[in-house]
Each structure stands twice: as structure tokens, then as C-alpha cells.
Amino acid sequence: MAGRLDATQCDAALKFLDGLPQPQVIDLAQLEYIASAGLRVFLLTQKRVKALGAGLRLINVKPQIHDIFRYAGFDRILDIARPAG
Amino acid sequence: MSGLLLMRAPIALIPVLLFLAALVHADSYKLVSVRAVLAMVAAGAAAAGASYVANIYAYVQFAGDFQAYSRYVSPWIEEALKAAVLVVLIRTRRVGLPVDAGIAGFAIGTGFALVENLYYLASRPETALPVQVIRGFGTAIMHGGTAAVLAMVSVTLYERRPDGGLQLLLPGFLAAVALHAGFNYLLVRPALATLATVIVLPAVIYLVFQHSERTLRDWLDDDLDSKVQLLEAINTGTFLDSHLGRYLQSLRELFRGEILADMLCLVRLHGELALRAKGVLLLRESGMEESLLDDETREKLAELAQLERAIGKTGMLALRPMMMATGKDIWQLKLLAP
């Protein structure tokens, strides 16, 4: 995912992720901004994927984006990894 | 009371219970649990019991006939007793938005109406079933609707003035009494009273409900952004150069240095907890059951309370332009309570 995941983009993002049979790893190296709507996209996808017995993994998450997940408590629900190095 | 009477009472309430269930279902953020709704229905039933006693005493003192009493006296008593339950919920921030306030009010009114219907049926067993159903249904919608109106108007006023006194309940209370008295005025023609009530009140409540849901979603977005920016500024050491930071520095003339340090800690802590509360809302909206109340959050809540005590009432008032300025700012932390 790249750019901004805000209210104007979340519907398209969710539609795309819903179309994937079982998304497991999402690279957020190019994601610059996330709003509550974007957080919602990941929660709903995680809920769907968990029901299939899997889990979502977000990799290369920028520090400022990682902080948002951490403050919201979603680092306990999603597998989130910062960029290596 | 015969079994037939006990069976008739709920028949009139089925549509009301369905509307209440629809409101609970439409609550996207699950602000009110089913258990809480049942407790509010029970509280409304208790208020009806108290109303029975109060009305008996008041009617004895009243000089006019029963029709005049039902139009000009009993609405004040009954709405005041329903309001007493809502006052506790609103003042303790157990409800903070028109969404949960509307559900709470309607639940209390439903409980009130159930007991009132049972009493009416027991005292007039000869009344035909269709009349009982129409009257019971209209009364239930009226009681639920007036309590919901009172609750929704009141939390809207408390949103703007979270420290406001009980006088903020007055506009909603007067509206509830007026609606109740109007319904009783029309009761000489029960079908008309029921029709007017059923058409107007549920529609108003539902429209306010939907507006409140949209407003909550917008607030989630806006406040999430502002809290993230605040925490980034504090973490990167640029906060004091910001508008809020300059305001905090301006308080140096009024408060000792250690109080100012506590204020900055409080601002940061509140920001972190506010974001965690938004996480709770988002989880509920997504239909996920995980709890975000971990030991770290509990410790932060305890620390927040400690800092508020250390800063004192005057200091907290001085911080009001920076945080806890609206009812939602205060209410959201209740989401983190066990």
C-alpha cells in the first residue's frame, strides 16, 4: 500500500483486500498517512482473515504509522513489523 | 392479576421493543450493551413504581378532575422520575453522545411503559383488547420518545459545556413534559394520540441517531489526527513551539514549575489514552471482541487520575482550552474503564 489511507481511499482499499482470497502480508513502506478509516480497513481484513484461520502481517511500517497502531492498541491485534535496519 | 392480562401487556409493547432493538442494532460502535439496556429497562420500571406512589399523593392534593391532572400535573412527575435515572447516566458520563443517550432514554421509557401498561390493564380489565393495544402502544412510544428526547437534548448541551450544572437538563426536560402533556391531551381519542406519537417521535429519534453516528465518525477522524500530531510534537521536542505549547508556557506566571511539568505529562497521557479509546470504538465498529484494556492502560488511567489531583481544580480549568474541552473528550475515557 502507498500514499494516504484516508476516508476517500478506504472503500477502494477494502474492496481490493476483500477480493483477495487470503491476504497475509501487506507492505506499508510507501504508506505516508493513515486515518481512522484506514485503521478500520485493516481491522475488518484481519477479522475476515482470522476467521479463515490465518492472520494479517503488516511489514515495513514507518515509525509514525507504527505509533498510531501502538497508541490505538492495534499492535496487540495485528502483526506489525517496522523496516529492518 | 390474571394470566390473560399479563399476556396482553406485552402485546402492545412488541413494536416498541422492536424499535428499541433496532436502535441497539443500529448502534455501530456498540456504545450500549444488551445488559445495560436491560438494566435501563428495569430502572424505568422502578421509576414507574415510584411514579404510582407520587401520583396517588399528588392527585389527592389536586383540586381539578382527572383529565386536567393527566394533562397538567402527571407529565411533570413522570418525566422527572424518568429524568432522575438519566441524570445519573449523563452526569457519570455513562452516556455521552446522542446515540447512547437515545438508546438509554428509550429503554428507560420502555420499562416505565411496561409497568404502566400492567397497571392500566389491571385497573380496567373490561377494556377491549384493540383499545388496550392501541393505548398501550402509543403510551410506550410516548414514554420512550420523551425520555429519548430529554437524553439527546441534554447530552448535546453537555457536549458544549461538560462542566455545566443540572440546568442543562432543563430544555430537554421541558420538551419531554410538553410532548407528554400533548399526548395526554389527545388521549380522548387514543387512536389519534397513538398515530401522532408513532409518526413523529420514532422518526425524530432515528434522524438524530443517524446524524450522531455520522458526527461520531467525523470526530473519530479529526480527533485521531490531532492527537497523533500532538504526540508527535511532544515526542520530537517541538511541542513548546506549537500553538498549544505556547499556551502552556503562558501559564508559567500562574503555576509552579512542577505543576507545569505535570500538565505536560497530563496532556501527553490524555492524548495516548484518547487514541486507545478510539481504538476501542474502531474495534467495536468492526465487530471484534478483543479487549484493549491491558495493565499498561490501567496504569496510565491511574496515573492520569493522580496527575489531575496533583494539578488541582484550578490547574485543570486552565488546561481546558487544550484538552477535555468537550463532553466527548471526557466521555471517551469511560470506554477504557473495566
Image (cartoon, coloured by chain):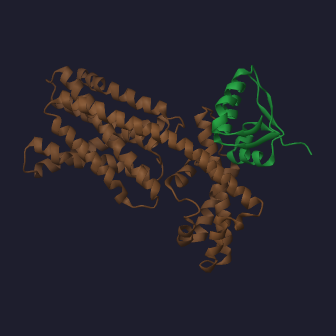
Chain colours: A green, B brown
Above/below status of B11 relative to B208: above
Residue placed at 70% from the left, 56% from the top? B231
Q: Residue furthest right?
A: A85
Residue placed at 25% from the left, 47% from the top? B177
Residue placed at 42% from the left, 50% from the top? B156
Which one is in front, B85 or B30?
B30
Which one is in front, B305 or B139?
B139
Q: Position of residue B332 (x, y in %)?
A: 56, 49
Q: Position of residue B19 (x, y in %)?
A: 38, 29
Which one is in front, B66 or A74?
A74
Above/below status of B54 relative to A21: below
Question: Is A23 placed left or right of B43 in the picture?
Answer: right
- Residue B92 visible? The answer is yes
Residue placed at 58% from the left, 60% from the top? B323
Residue A53 appears in which quarter of the rendering? Answer: top right
Q: Position of residue B152 (x, y in %)?
A: 39, 45
Quarter that holds the N terminus of chain B: top left
- Residue B298 visible? The answer is no
Question: Is A14 placed left or right of B92 in the picture?
Answer: right
